Image (tube, rainbow, N blue to C red):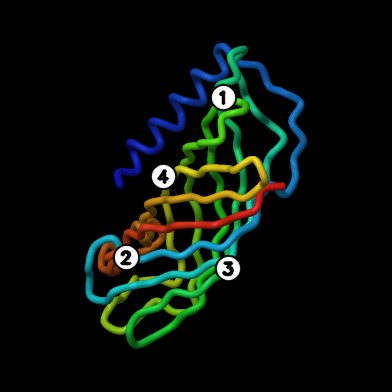
Amino acid sequence: MNRRVILFVALLSFALSLGTAKCSDTKSGWEEIGIRMGIQAAPKNEYFHRYDVFAVYKLPWDWRSPSGWGVAPQLETSLGALYTSAETGFISSVGAGLTFGKTGFNLTPELGVGLHLMDRSHFGKQDFGSILLWEAHLGLSYRFDCGLGIGYRIQHMSNNRILYSSNTPNPGVDMHMISVSWHF
């Protein structure tokens, strides 16, 4: 996933929403909790599975146009496990995202970035180069009227060589993630 494209779409959406929208008096707070499972999108040196519990915190801003379309920022945190055929490791994350949608419409696109901390940088034959990874994701979720939600996201995690030398390995991993959650 190209980071520049994601950043461009996020900034463009934000700028357009400010032009015609007003900030509503949305309350902040814990909005969603759930579980997420992922499988690796493309083979690398190892084949990965991931299992998380996650929580989403809604920030107090919600920019909406008069027709109800808009964008809302959120924070997300997760705690989970990253598996290969030979090893299991701890992974945690914290990140920020934007959701796009219309008031009363249950299908919500989202995008976000995050920082992941793992208990090791090596998993079998795969060397991530660091225990600190960056992540970008693009997803779609559906919230049923009863509060139950389901979601899908494609995410890319790597060290991006931002804090590390050019000699540091940077294989990254792309994952398909599905989730089941409860919305408050």
- How many C-alpha atoms fall within 10 Å of the one at disc 2: few (<14), some, or many (≥20)? some
Residue 78, x across and y down, in percent: 58, 62
Q: State if disc 4 and disc 1 touch (CB < 8 Å).
A: no
Disc 2 target residue: 40
Residue 125, x across and y down, in percent: 26, 82
Q: State if disc 3 and disc 2 touch (CB < 8 Å).
A: no
How far separated are the C-alphas under marks 2 and 3? 18 Å
Name the residue type under label 3: Leu
Name the residue type under label 2: Gln
Sequence-first tag of 1 and 4:
1
Disc 4 target residue: 138
Q: Quadrant of residue 65?
A: top right
Q: State if disc 3 and disc 4 touch (CB < 8 Å).
A: no
Q: Residue at x 38, y 56 (%)?
A: 162
Residue 2, x across and y down, in percent: 30, 43
Sequence-first tag of 1 and 2:
2
How far separated are the C-alphas under marks 3 and 1? 29 Å
Q: Residue at x 72, y 47 (%)?
A: 184
Disc 3 target residue: 79
Disc 1 target residue: 70
Judged from the image, the secondary structure of the residue bearing numbered disc 4 is strand
Judged from the image, the secondary structure of the residue bearing numbered disc 3 is strand
Q: Nearer the viewer, residue 164 or 171?
A: 171
Q: Nearer the viewer, residue 15 or 47?
A: 47
Name the residue type under label 4: Leu
